Amino acid sequence: MNLKEMNLGDEGLEYVASCLRRWPGLCSRIARELERGGDVFAPLPAETARERALEFETGGLLPWRETCVWFEREIEHLSGRAANGSLVFQDLVARPHDPVLGKYDGVFFDQSSAVYHILGHHDISAAVISRTMLRMRSFLLVAVFCNFGFSAADVPTTCILDETLIDEMANNAQEVFVSAYDREGLVVWRKA
């Protein structure tokens, strides 16, 4: 399936911002970044009408697998252009005490008990992105590509990220991906 980036304008910006404002940590900080503007689009089948593209809660536009393939390629492209890019997933329903999280590398928390799966520049590949997405417990997928070199060595053994690090991720966000279309697609904010 050939996906085309369809510009969603202010309606798309409001959708992404409304999804992020509801959650603490990186999500709420990124919602503030969106106030500075940027471009919002969705990778959709080329024949999709704009009116249909603005129905963010309704599925049936494309298979999730096609969205995942597009997402993996987009992240690999961004990573290839950035010297120190990182991909951050915020799992909106997981909590630090969830036993399953102890089985995974790259899991971190913040003071608000938000849970993050972070892939540093050298960890980014289609296979690792796919595995990380399968770990997510939240129906709403939120991922952020940051032009920021994340290293687990910079985090204490408690795996708790300090507020400065969260702010740095938000300030260096290049693209934000939020699931839409009954979690079959994505709406993407791109820094201007």
Image (tube, grey):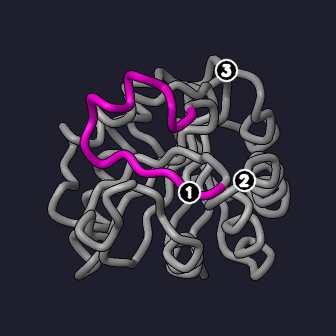
Q: Position of residue 104 (x, y in %)?
A: 27, 35
Mark 1 element type: loop
The image quadrant where one finds the C terminus is: bottom right
User: Which circle's residue, 1 or 2, is located before the other in the chain?
Assistant: 2
Find the distance from the CA under tag 2 to the CA under tag 3.
Answer: 27 Å
Find the distance from the CA under tag 1 to the CA under tag 2.
Answer: 10 Å
Q: How many C-alpha atoms fall within 10 Å of the one at disc 3: few (<14), some, or many (≥20)?
A: some
Residue to which mark 3 is pinned: 59
Closer-to-camera residue (117/58): 117
Q: Does 177 appear above or below 78?
A: above
Residue to which mark 2 is pinned: 24
Q: Which residues are magenta?
A: 95-111
The answer to which image quadrant residue 122 occupies is: bottom left
- Residue at position x 41%, y 23% from top? 99
Marks 1 and 2: which is nearer the front? 1
Q: Are marks 1 and 2 in contact (CB under 8 Å)?
A: yes
Left or right relative to 56: residue 71: left
- Residue at position x 18%, y 49% from top? 125
Q: Residue 4, which numbered label?
A: none
Q: Position of residue 128 (x, y in %)?
A: 22, 41
Examine the rendering and report whether any part of residue 171 can be seen: yes
